[in-house]
Structures are given as C-alpha cells and as structure tokens.
Amino acid sequence: MLKPKDRLFVALDVDDLHAADVLINRMQGVVSQYKLGAQLLAAAGPEAVRHLKRRGYGVFYDAKFHDIPNTVEAAVKNACRLGVTIVNVHTTGGTAMMAAAAAAAREVARKLRQPKTMVLGVTVLTSLSQGVVNKELCLRRQLRSYVVHLAKLAQKAGLDGVVASPMEIEAIRKACGRDFIILTPGIRPAGSDQGDQKRTMTPKQAIAAGANFIVVGRPVYQASDPLQVVRSIYREIEEAE
Ligand code: C5P
C-alpha cells in the first residue's frame, strides 16, 4: 500500500525555479512529489523537471497535451525521457491520440529500461461547472456521466487512468475497476478557500471515495505554514484508508 506522502502531489504553481526552491526547501523531507504545470513549465521548461529529479523528487508533468496523435506521441516520449512519474493528455483528443500517448510511454520505458511513466487522461477540468458545460460547451449530458464516458474511452485506449474531479471518483471506480488510476485535483482541506475550483472535496473524502492520488496547490503554497497543512493532509489520508 502507498504511504500518504506517495499519494500527494503538491502543485508548484510558481513563476520560476527560485520561487520553486523556496517552497521546496520549506517542505524538505516531508513532501516527496510535485506537480509541474503550465505556469512553471512556460518559464523554466524541461529544466524545471530535471531540477526536481536531481533533488530526488517524483514529478507529475501536468502537460495536458491536446493535439494530433503524431504530435502528442512525440511530446509524450520527450516527457517520459525526463523520467517523470506521471504525464497527462486530454481525453477529448480522442482514442487514437490517447492510444499513441500510451504506446509512447511503453516504448520509452522499454528502450531506456526505466519505470514506465503513467499516462493519465484529463476528463473535464475541475473548474468547469455543469452550467458552463451546458451553456458554453453545448453539452447536454450530465457532467458525471460524461466524465465516466471519457474515463471508459481512456481505459479502452490503454491509458493508466484519468484526472477527474472528486465528485466523479466513485462513478469512475465503479465503471473502470480497481486497477484504474484516479488522480484528483480540486482538493480543499476543511476551511480553505475554493478559489476558482467548483467541484471540490477534502483530502479525506477524496481518498475515501477511491482516489489513488490527490493534487493540492493553493491551500499548501499560499498557507502561512505550508508544512502544517501538508501534515494535516497526510493525517486525513491515513484516516480515510
Ligand atoms: O491551487 P489548486 O489546488 O486549485 O491547484 C490545482 C492544480 O491542479 C492546478 O495546478 C491545476 O492546474 C491542476 N489541475 C486542475 N484540474 C485538472 C487538472 C489539473 O485543477 N483537471
């Protein structure tokens, strides 16, 4: 069974490597995995990943690739070569694109003889509400059943799992089985700000509902005492197991 520290990725949503280091140093020895997304990657690129790997951290490369299969395949290969634990693509890129991403990860692991990077599919962003999905994206379906549909598509295409809001964990688990990975952002420890996230749960609720991994950003890095927040997240994970 995974330890609580292996189930949390702290989002390093900062502007440069110096700011990242300030945060990492504060949480040294307590946090072992970080999520790198658009903000830091657009500033520091793959060097940000190498920097974290050199310091011994597990990395979730939150690329959210969404492009034609050929381009995504090549991009996933490059991400996997960096030795990241997780990379993601959008499920709405379609089955062929997801299958190309899955094959790319398998090929790099085999050729470089390194652990296979998990490839996850982003379903529907946790910042989107049912109302927005209906009105702006013209999707009449219930969000939950749409997310389950996308998760099944991802599974069929050979992805290891999906990124979904906590609200959909139980339905995905039921539809895709216990070996399918579910990673969930939109986590808010009790008493913290929602920010722009619409479909949230506490760490304890998300783990109890069946999430394998959780991603937490602002509630940790905006806290006056991030270490205390991380420790309380670990306690919540333990309580839920
Ligand atoms: O600050 P907060 O805890 O809301 O951060 C959540 C992180 O997870 C952000 O870095 C965001 O980009 C990411 N994320 C998300 N929803 C997804 C996938 C990733 O919020 N579907």
Image (cartoon, rainbow, N blue to C red):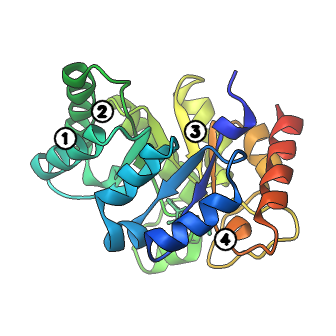
| Residue with the mark numbered 1 | 96
Residue at image x 28%, y 25%?
Answer: 109
Q: Gap between marks 2 and 4, in whole Å?
A: 33 Å
Residue 112, image x and y in percent? 23, 24
| Residue with the mark numbered 3 | 172
Quarter residue 193 falls in = bottom right
Q: Gap between marks 4 and 1, in whole Å?
A: 34 Å
- Is label 2 in contact with label 1 (beta carbons under 8 Å)? yes
Residue 122, image x and y in percent? 43, 52
Q: Is mark 4 within 8 Å of ligand 1?
A: yes
Q: Classify mark 3: residues with Cα within 10 Å, few (<14), some (14-19) or many (20+).
A: many
Q: Gap between marks 3 and 2, in whole Å?
A: 16 Å
The residue nearer to you, when weighing 141 against 56, is 56
Residue 71, image x and y in percent? 13, 52
Can you tell which of label 2 and label 4 is closer to the viewer? 4
Q: Secondary structure at mark 4?
A: helix
Q: Gap between marks 3 and 1, in whole Å?
A: 21 Å
Can you tell which of label 4 and label 1 is closer to the viewer? 4
Q: Which mark is residue 157?
A: 2
* Quadrant of the image containing the C terminus: top right
Nearer-N-terminus badge (4/3):
3
Residue 150, visible in the rendered structure: no
Q: Gap between marks 4 and 3, in whole Å?
A: 26 Å
Nearer-N-terminus badge (3/2):
2
Nearer-N-terminus badge (3/1):
1
Nearer-N-terminus badge (2/4):
2
Residue at image x 77%, y 54%?
Answer: 230
Q: Tell me the amino acid under the disc marked 4.
A: Arg
| Residue with the mark numbered 4 | 218
Q: Classify mark 4: residues with Cα within 10 Å, few (<14), some (14-19) or many (20+).
A: some
